Image (spheres, rainbow, N blue to C red):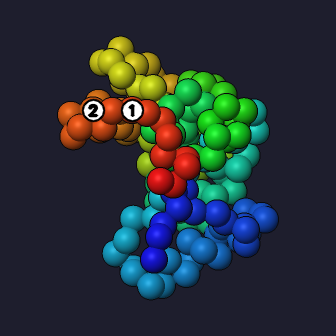
Amino acid sequence: VGLISPPPHHDMYSIEDVAQLISDLKNANPEARISVKLVSKVGVGIIAAGITKGKTDHLLISGASGGTGAAKWTSIKHCGLPWEIGLAETHQTLVLNGLREKVVVQADGQVKTGRDVVHAALLGAEEVCMSTQPLIVLGCIMMRKCHLNT
């Protein structure tokens, strides 16, 4: 069976739907660390707060300039903002709602240097994802054609 990355979520229409999926996953494996990936955009903080109330363990705020090309081309070209904007909004919203201690926040999207890591930490990230460099080391030639599922 082929796997398209990222998989479509046609049954996700609300934060409550995501919360139900989180609950189902935790029931299936109580030891699992459940992570939800959100695209950096205006308003992501409110969504992050709702998902945190839905008991996710981990939030990934993904910037618009990141990715390996696995998303659909329209998503790569036309979605999201820099991770710094979404991360700052998410952190502030979680703090204002007393939820910051309930979730681990991670940032990704062209995090390449130690300076980027420090910048992310100052904006509220506890973790960062640096994916491009390991892919290159493993032999990826970064054609950015993964979205074609070939």
Residue 11: percent from left, percent from top: 73, 72
Counting residues from the start of the chain, the first of labels 1 and 2 encountered is 2
- Which residue carries the number 1 mark? 142
Q: Quadrant of the N terminus?
A: bottom left
Q: Is residue 67 left or right of residue 9?
A: left
Q: CA distance from mark 1 to mark 2?
A: 7 Å
- Which residue carries the number 2 mark? 136
SS at badge 1: loop
Residue type at mark 1 is Met
Q: Is residue 71 visible?
A: yes
Q: Is residue 41 visible?
A: no
Q: Is residue 72 left or right of residue 59?
A: right
| Residue at the image position 73 percent from the left and 68 percent from the top | 10
User: Is residue 128 or residue 100 the one in the foreground?
Assistant: 128
User: Is residue 39 or residue 149 the one in the foreground?
Assistant: 149
Q: Residues within 10 Å of mark 1 (few under 14, many from 20)?
A: few
| Residue at the image position 27 percent from the left and 32 percent from the top | 136
Q: Are marks 1 and 2 in contact (CB under 8 Å)?
A: yes
Residue 106, by quadrant, is: top left
| Residue at the image position 23 percent from the left and 37 percent from the top | 139
Residue type at mark 2 is Ile
